[in-house]
Image: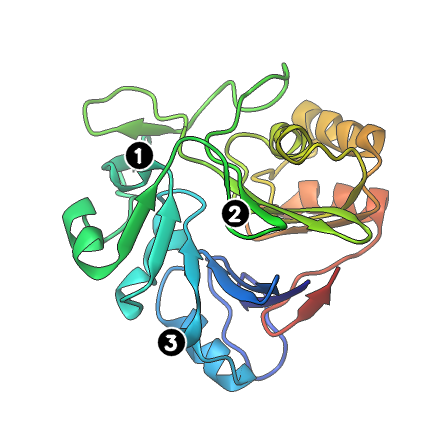
Amino acid sequence: MKLTVLSDAKAMNGFQPEHGLSFYIEYDQIRILLDTGASSKFKDNAKRLGIDLDKIDKVVLSHGHFDHGNGLPYLRHTTLVCHPDCFVKRFRKKGNGNIGISLSGQEVRERFDLQPSEKPFRLSAHIYFLGEIPRINDFETWETPYMLEDGQDDYIVDDSGLACVTENGLVVVSGCAHSGICNIIEHAKKITGMDNVEAVIGGFHLKNADHRTRKTIECIKQIGVRRVYPSHCTMGPALEMFHEAFGRNEVLVGQEFRF
């Protein structure tokens, strides 16, 4: 399995960073794009790497936030897999900033072969879309800084990810982990029937050296994940805690990871 970083906050020389996330995955003889970043930069970075995004087999949207889905207008005529709630209107509670995706649900249906699902399902023999993530622990996702258009709390129930079964073990790929990275790993284990977790990579949505970050690190160690690559929305003191616990495994635009 090969994963190439097309959009993230930090970049190798010659590539464009942004506050966004996009991973290009090649496995099982198919090509999957997980998220599209916040702009067209993912496509510019792909071109520099010699990746032809016109040949991707599926786009998977991890959740409906602008920094993961605003690159969608630069793609078309392919399958788009996501949770049905990815295209609701959503805002920050402080400042009422719109954080949803620029395309409406109708525009998405016109551009893509839309395959929405709350349930997990196989994208290929060894790749799973995880669907809606059960929130089972007592330290993740119990508060939210977001709200829906009607003012109700928005817990980003559409947050999902991918699970890839490799020879070395399970590889869990997250967009932002609003549902909690430990919840995502446990769900991936249940869906695939695997306890052997080789790696987890993507956004963990942690920023502070606080109780939640400490509990998350303890949980990942207890699960026995061998390779941990926090990126995107894992920032500041929280990121340093992960580097201290698991080594300085940076994720940069332009990098290729093999699992």
The circle drawn on residue 175 is 2
Q: Is residue 105 visible?
A: yes
Q: As shown in the figure, which amino acid type bears the numbered disc 2? A: Gly
Considering only order in the chain, which callout, 3 or 2, is on the residue closer to the N terminus?
Answer: 3
Q: How many marks?
A: 3
Residue 13 position (above or below residue 111): below
Choose mark 2 or mark 1, whichever is in front.
1
Q: Are marks 2 and 3 in contact (CB under 8 Å)?
A: no
x and y percent of residue 211 in the render? 70, 23
Residue 74 position (above or below residue 143): below
Q: Residues within 10 Å of mark 1 (few under 14, many from 20)?
A: some
Q: As shown in the figure, which amino acid type bears the numbered disc 1? A: Asp
x and y percent of residue 67 in the render? 40, 53
CA distance separating discs 3 and 1: 26 Å
Q: As shown in the figure, which amino acid type bears the numbered disc 3? A: Asp
Residue drawn at (64%, 17%), measured in percent from left and top? 137
Choose mark 2 or mark 3, whichever is in front.
3
CA distance separating discs 2 and 3: 22 Å
Element under disc 1: helix
Considering only order in the chain, which callout, 1 or 2, is on the residue closer to the N terminus?
Answer: 1
Residue at the disc numbered 1: 85
Residue drawn at (56%, 44%), measured in percent from left and top? 128
Element under disc 3: helix
The circle drawn on residue 54 is 3
CA distance separating discs 2 and 1: 16 Å
Residue 243 position (above or below residue 70): above
Horizontally, residue 108 falls left or right of residue 156, namely left
Choose mark 3 or mark 1, whichever is in front.
3
- Quarter in which the N terminus is drawn: bottom right
x and y percent of residue 60 in the render? 43, 52
Q: Quadrant of residue 59?
A: bottom left
Considering only order in the chain, which callout, 1 or 3, is on the residue closer to the N terminus?
Answer: 3
